[in-house]
Amino acid sequence: MMRYITTAVMVIGLSVSASSFSAMAELGPEEQKLADMMLSGDMVQLKTASKRIFSTKMADPELLDIAAAILLKKYPRAVRSDVDSLAWLARAIGASENGRYYGVLSEVVENTQIDKLERHADTALDELPGAEGEQFVAGMYTLPEDLYSKEADADIVSRLKEMMLAGDLASLKRAAQEMSSKELRSEALCDLAAEILLRNYATAQKNQADTFAWLTNAIGRSGMARYRDALREVEEHSEIRKLRRYAESNRDELSEETTEQYRKGMIDIPLPDYAF
């Protein structure tokens, strides 16, 4: 039977705040709190809720249907930063020992391209007795349309570029970490990362080293051959051992194809000094 969020929630714009889902059917206070966390759209809250469901072996189908719906929606386009949360979500479903979710976990095991997620889904699948009763399938629980939806590429680039140009090390590091975790192949972002590195590596201070190392990670995870020479320059000439080491390891992640190399000055814009 297909379930829908309440009319009141739909009227106020499908808000996914905790209060928006307080009217969801027949959940106790603890289960409701965990449902609200899963429906928050925040991967950290999703992970926290999943760990709680797993550790307490909660088996309420109303709660587990939400977990299954999120897992089916999110796993096909999961990125590196999603994996822990989705792995815990799969384990939470397995801990219920409810055969209703056998098909869900089987689909993840058979189709995910992420080894860690496949392993955890397979472990969770082993905890189920088999495909017992009506199987949960996508659409049996209707999530808000934009919940855990993929952010548009142009919006990601714009948001991360703004963070990289904010002028502080913390914002620059967060942007680089997100680029790394999502393995973004954005020439616009990687050009900016390379320009920041090339302008700053020679005079970098110890307090900047970790952030600049994350920039090399962001470039390396892109796999784009365009940045081999930029990372090689940092590897060969930086006076900071950590930065040289990260530049070397990330250069090895780049494609060997022949292509135009990024050179310092290809982006001709003022940059902050990232001193704090």
Image (cartoon, helix red, strand yellow):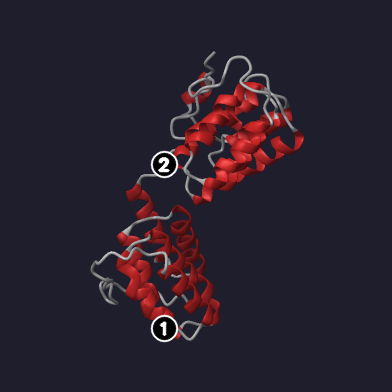
Q: Are marks 1 and 2 in contact (CB under 8 Å)?
A: no
In this image, 177 relative to 47: left or right? left
Three-letter code for the amino acid on which mark 1 is drawn: Glu
Q: Which mark is residue 23?
A: none
Where residue 86 sits, quadrant-wise, is top right
* Residue 9 place in picture, x, y as percent: 52, 25
Q: Is residue 37 visible?
A: no
Farthest residue, direction right: 56
Question: Would you name the residue on which mark 2 appears?
Answer: 150
Under circle 1, the secondary element is helix
Determine the residue positioned at 45% across, 83% down. Answer: 238
**Of circles 1 and 2, which is in front?**
1
Q: Is residue 202 visible?
A: yes
Determine the residue positioned at 63% across, 32% down. Answer: 125
In this image, 260 relative to 162: left or right? left
For this rendering, which residue is in front, 146 or 128?
128
Three-letter code for the amino acid on which mark 2 is drawn: Lys
Say above or below: 191 vs 150: below
Question: Would you name the residue on which mark 1 appears?
Answer: 236
Specify few, some or many for label 1: CA neighbours under 10 Å numbering under 14, 14-19, or 20 or more.
Answer: few
Specify few, some or many for label 2: CA neighbours under 10 Å numbering under 14, 14-19, or 20 or more.
Answer: few
For this rendering, which residue is in front, 52 or 111?
111
